[in-house]
Image (cartoon, rainbow, N blue to C red):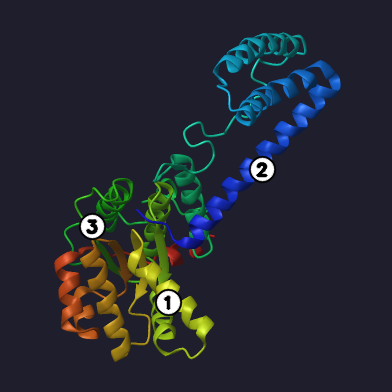
Amino acid sequence: MGYEGEVLHRANARLALRRKERERAGQALRSRLFTQCPELGDIDRQLRGAILDVITSCLRSGSDPGPSLGVIQDKNMELQARQTQLLQELGYPPDALDDKSVCPHCNDTGWQGTRMCECLKALCAEEQVRELSKLLDLGEQSFDAFSLDWYSPLPWPGESLSPRENMEFIYEVCLNYAQKFGKFYFKNLFLTGDPGLGKTFLSACMARTVAENGFSVVYDTATSLFSKFEEQKFSRNVYEGEQARSETRKYLGCDLLILDDLGSEFTSPFVQSALYTLINTRLTRGKATVISSNLTMDGMRERYNGQTASRLEGEYRALRFYGEDIRLKRKAAL
């Protein structure tokens, strides 16, 4: 599981801000208590300075600090007992002056050794969802908000299932794919069907759930994605070229890529090559991909090269949407 650099940067910045806010709050409390009870300030200064003074003195003289530290420890016990008494008299717990981390597992550093702490993972997941929200209206797009009522329960020409029965199946596949991401039977999905049937909505639902569970997710349209590949290859502007390279690295390396509306882009030999590279590289790396398109698998074979179509047919589970245009039905109901 790896996060895009910008997502990790923003999560780390929030963690650093949390540490600063905690330090400011602690300093404000200490100042207030020491003003209210000067003896607490005296005790605090003695506790902080005693051991350091002994060690410094012994290092200068070359003597063993052990005996002196024992004396200091006994003295500190007395000071701590008096500190506890004063705090309780003021209505505060004994540890009110302690520097307490929000996360006890990593002390708000975000890392436990070389392993990312759960607190930083949670912040990364929030930043992932925020990033996706720039492209998707994640305010309403969730599995809980998905309604089957818009799909007809009546038979559909040439199909054994009604549109509603078909969508019940598709919904369950997409829900389980997202909730069991990385462990679900199908690693890659191909959502196919006419416009207005819910492909983008369910793609957004999967993106949101997978991101909230701590995986790196990138969502983009086919037109935007291929433009980044073109910029990477042909741009003469160094800055724009580097930005494009960063974007293409995200497409190739994220845990889940959701490629929306494949087939809407202008198809050229370069696009065909880029699509094959994208699909093949992600399969080789074991990365999951969800593709939505108005094209069928047969249409994919006609539009793109045989190698690409072969990868899609062999490695993707196709889910075919059919029924009446939901967007038009919603508009008519307003």
Position of residue 163 in the picture relative to residue 69 (left or right): left
Does residue 138 appear in the picture of this structure? no
Q: Between 238 and 313, which is closer to the camera in this rendering?
A: 238
Residue 282 image-quadrant placement:
bottom left
Q: Which residue is mark 2?
A: 20
Position of residue 104 in the picture relative to residue 209 (left or right): right
Q: Between 3 and 86, which is closer to the camera in this rendering?
A: 86
Name the residue type under label 2: Lys
Does residue 104 appear in the picture of this structure? yes
Q: Which residue is mark 3?
A: 187
Whichever of callouts 3 and 2 sits on the residue coming sooner in the sequence is 2
Q: Secondary structure at mark 2?
A: helix
Residue at 23% in and 61% down: 286
Residue 134 image position (x, y, % from top left): 54, 63
Whichever of callouts 3 and 1 sits on the residue coming sooner in the sequence is 3
Q: Between 71 and 96, which is closer to the camera in this rendering?
A: 71
**Above or below for 200 versus 8:** below
Name the residue type under label 3: Lys
